[in-house]
Image (cartoon, rainbow, N blue to C red):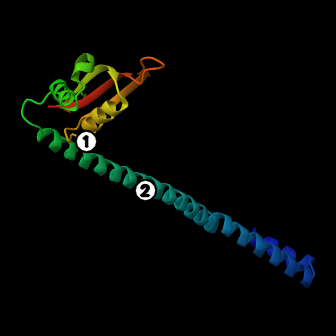
Amino acid sequence: MIRKVKLYIERKLSRREQMAVYAAAGIILLLLVFQVLVAPIFTKRERMGKALHGKIAVLNEVLTLKKEYDGLRRETERSSRRIASREKGFTLFSFLDKLSGSVGVKDKISYMKPSTSNTPNSNLKKSTVEMELRSISVEQLTNFLYGVETSGKMVSVKRLSITKKDKQDAALVVVLQVETFES
């Protein structure tokens, strides 16, 4: 078949036309080779490059999460050591009772409501005490909050509500929720 086409081209076409036909056939052959062999290589290389960039992004995210996890683990270990270093029999209720006495607001306590709840995936339980202080000054409140937050006992104020008792009086009514973790 190719031989017949070649003979036809040689007999019927001039030398110039023959060169044009051979050039066109060569170009078509080159385009066919490019489409079949070269283009898939570049396409696959591009896909692999995009996949590589995606994997690098995932790796960076994993490394960021690992760094965050390691920081949280160190913080948890540090907190566990601080909780374990508290005196034997530590309870949040008794701590707040002693602190209110040392700061001079024990007589201002209207109520103290203790509660505990288990923490999922941990051997610790969360201990919470809600308390109300009536007719307390700003200075007394500041001293009490400072004592809670700087005690080193892993105790923190979770919620705080301050209202004025009277418009003329400087006395405050404070409801606060203090929490800690206990083993």
Q: Residue furthest front?
A: 168
Residue at image position (19%, 31%) is 99
Give the x, y percent position of residue 72: 29, 46
Nearer to the camera, 131 or 158:
131
Q: Is residue 55 above or below residue 26?
A: above
Label 1 neighbourhood size at 10 Å, few (<14), some (14-19), many (20+)?
Answer: few
Residue at (25, 24) in percent of width and height: 128
Which residue is denoted by mark 1 in the rendering?
Answer: 150
Asked whether residue 121 appears in the rendered view, the answer is: no
Answer with mark 1 or mark 2, whichever residue precedes in sequence: 2
- Say which residue appears at 26% left-offset and 29% top-offset: 179
Left or right: 129 as drawn, with respect to 61: left
Q: Secondary structure at mark 1?
A: loop
Pick whichever, 154 or 122, lies toward us.
Answer: 154
Q: Please identify the quadrant where the N terminus is shown.
A: bottom right
- The amino acid type, in three-letter code, at marker 2 is Asn
Please name the residue shown 56% across and 61% down the image: 44
Say what secondary structure mark 2 lies in: helix
**Which residue is under mark 2?**
60
Q: Quadrant of residue 145?
A: top left
Cα–Cα span, label 1 and label 2: 38 Å
**Is 127 left or right of 4, judged from the image as shown?**
left
Q: Between label 1 and label 2, give the one nearer the viewer.
A: 1
- The answer to whether the residues at label 1 and label 2 have Cβ atoms under 8 Å apart is no
Q: Residue 173 appears at what percent x and percent y?
A: 37, 20
Identity, as a three-letter code, of the amino acid under mark 1: Thr
Quarter of the figure with residue 144: top left
Quarter the C terminus occupies? top left
**Does 169 sit left or right of 180 as displayed?**
right
Figure check: 23 above or below 137: below
* Position in image of residue 16 (x %, y %): 91, 83
